[in-house]
């Protein structure tokens, strides 16, 4: 057993799923669920996401692995204190959606490994936890950490080692840009547009993710995301111009190049 | 029985689904499946999507209702001949994703009613047909046609009467824009981006729709779609600029206004 005791800070969808997966797969013996919200803690315990609960970060001092599973800017705020509480030989990691800012906050602490399991749905909180969400998902780590890679594999996920800058560039395109587009579409169309069908629902699904989490993602990946937004804006304007000019060949090319 | 015999031109996902739904719900006695593709016709018959088949549009002359379920520009090309083949009292309709061009093509023919069932998936052809896809879906009609509205309801769909211009404006936003975005994202990310998770898959799902169908949609709704593309491009550029300037309040507002 690599980590006999794990503390998870944030009993939301990801933290709760992780606790459930660790306990069900018997990858640890003890999960300390830490959250400010007493109701989330009660639910987490009832769902089998932790074996004990606390509202105090200091409870993490006993753990062999501490996982910060809160919105990115909360990770940044908690990181120094969580790192100082670590007992010798213990590791600190996180599940935040952007990695450069977390990597900067973790840098002073050798046992701190930025991580990002790329899974989860738009649904918030412990009610949406599911121990199977990690199966097959990429789980980015931006520092080598054999014990953590081993755990990630044991959870059914796929460790991907990359720099925080590369992660944030790639995530800006495949995750944060689709999220920004979903927000924009959902605002432009208003609630319950009468002709909304499958393509609209697919494109706006992630707009339902909690606003505080979403804002943290955009705000902690500003430049890679701004670049993707501008590149997409230019691409959409080129298509608009081809449509206005009746440039059939250009429109067909746009479709053909994007058709999967 | 409002339409004892229905001819469906195009045994793809929508045409096939319609034939299956009509026959299973006993809304007609005879469905003539018409397609250029003999293999699609054999499959359609095997799946219970039609009771007879033909590769010749003239087979529609016996029908009480003729449905053109082919890509939009093929609808435009077939419309005059299909309308002239109609027997007295029969109706002609279509399932095309844009309506202004179809409405112009149908205008000379009093029995021709432009229609759009807003359902279906990105998967192509008769293999993807499903008689339940109409359930709860909006089905736009741009002319009053009580017999057709009755049939739409009997299929479990919801008739929505609106002008072809209003349809195309609204569909540009809720359907064609998400499709264009999906194409753009899927091309920009390339095949199998390593960090792609749920938000990317949702946002690009519809990019898999057959290219010929997709190009027809964009090309027959050029101005409403160009306007939506330009509006979105401006919105994305504003967000990019807020991110670059570190305007936390503007980024939070963007998230809050789009959060569903």
Image: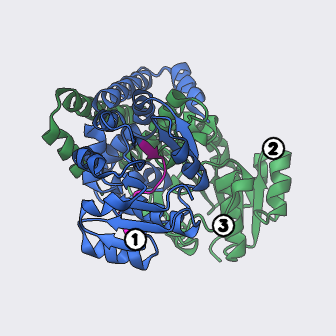
Chain colours: A green, B blue
Residue A130 vertical placement versus A68 (above, below) = below
| Location of residue A223 (image quadrant) | top left
The residue positioned 66% from the left and 47% from the top of the image is A82
**Residue A59: x percent and y percent?**
79, 53
Residue A68 vertical placement versus A245 (above, below) = below
Residue B117 within the magenta-colored segment of the rendering: yes
Q: Which residue is tagged 3?
A: A131
Q: Are marks 1 and 2 in contact (CB under 8 Å)?
A: no
Q: Earlier in the sequence, mark 2 or mark 3?
A: 2
The residue positioned 65% from the left and 77% from the top of the image is A1
Q: CA distance from mark 1 to mark 3?
A: 34 Å
**Residue A159: x percent and y percent?**
46, 65
Callout in the foreground (1, 2): 1
**Disc 2 and disc 3 on one polypeptide chain:** yes
Q: Which stretch did the figure color magenta? A: B115-127
* Foreground of the two, B7 or B189: B7
Q: Which residue is tagged 1?
A: B127
Mark 2 surroundings: few (<14), some (14-19) or many (≥20) residues within 10 A: few
Q: Which residue is tagged 2?
A: A37
Residue A147 within the magenta-colored segment of the rendering: no
User: Which numbered tag is attached to residue A92?
Assistant: none
Q: CA distance from mark 1 to mark 2?
A: 49 Å
The single residue placed furthest to the front in the displayed view is: B88
* Foreground of the two, A29 or B252: B252
Mark 1 surroundings: few (<14), some (14-19) or many (≥20) residues within 10 A: some
Please identify the dominant SS of the magenta region. loop
């Amino acid at each position: 057993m690599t980590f006999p005791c794990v503390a998870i800070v944030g009993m939301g969808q990801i933290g709760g799923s992780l606790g459930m997966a660790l306990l069900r797969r018997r990858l640890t013996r003890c999960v300390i669920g830490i959250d400010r919200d007493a109701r989330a803690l009660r639910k987490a315990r009832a769902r089998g996401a932790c074996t004990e609960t606390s509202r105090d970060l200091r409870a993490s001092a006993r753990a062999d692995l501490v996982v910060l599973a809160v919105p990115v800017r909360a990770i940044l705020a908690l990181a120094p204190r969580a790192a100082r509480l670590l007992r010798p030989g213990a590791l600190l990691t996180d599940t935040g959606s952007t990695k450069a800012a977390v990597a900067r906050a973790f840098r002073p602490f050798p046992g701190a490994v930025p991580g990002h399991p790329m899974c989860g749905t738009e649904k918030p909180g412990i009610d949406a936890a599911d121990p199977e969400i990690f199966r097959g998902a990429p789980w980015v780590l931006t520092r080598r950490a054999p014990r953590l890679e081993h755990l990630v594999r044991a959870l059914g996920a796929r460790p991907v080692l990359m720099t925080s800058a590369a992660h944030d560039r790639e995530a800006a395109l495949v995750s944060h840009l689709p999220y920004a587009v979903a927000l924009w579409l959902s605002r432009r169309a208003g609630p319950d547009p009468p002709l909304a069908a499958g393509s609209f629902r697919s494109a706006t699904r992630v707009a339902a993710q909690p606003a505080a989490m979403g804002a943290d993602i955009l705000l902690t990946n500003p430049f890679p995301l701004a670049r993707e937004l501008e590149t997409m804006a230019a691409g959409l304007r080129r298509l608009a111009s081809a449509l206005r000019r009746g440039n059939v060949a250009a429109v067909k090319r746009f479709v053909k190049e994007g058709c999967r």
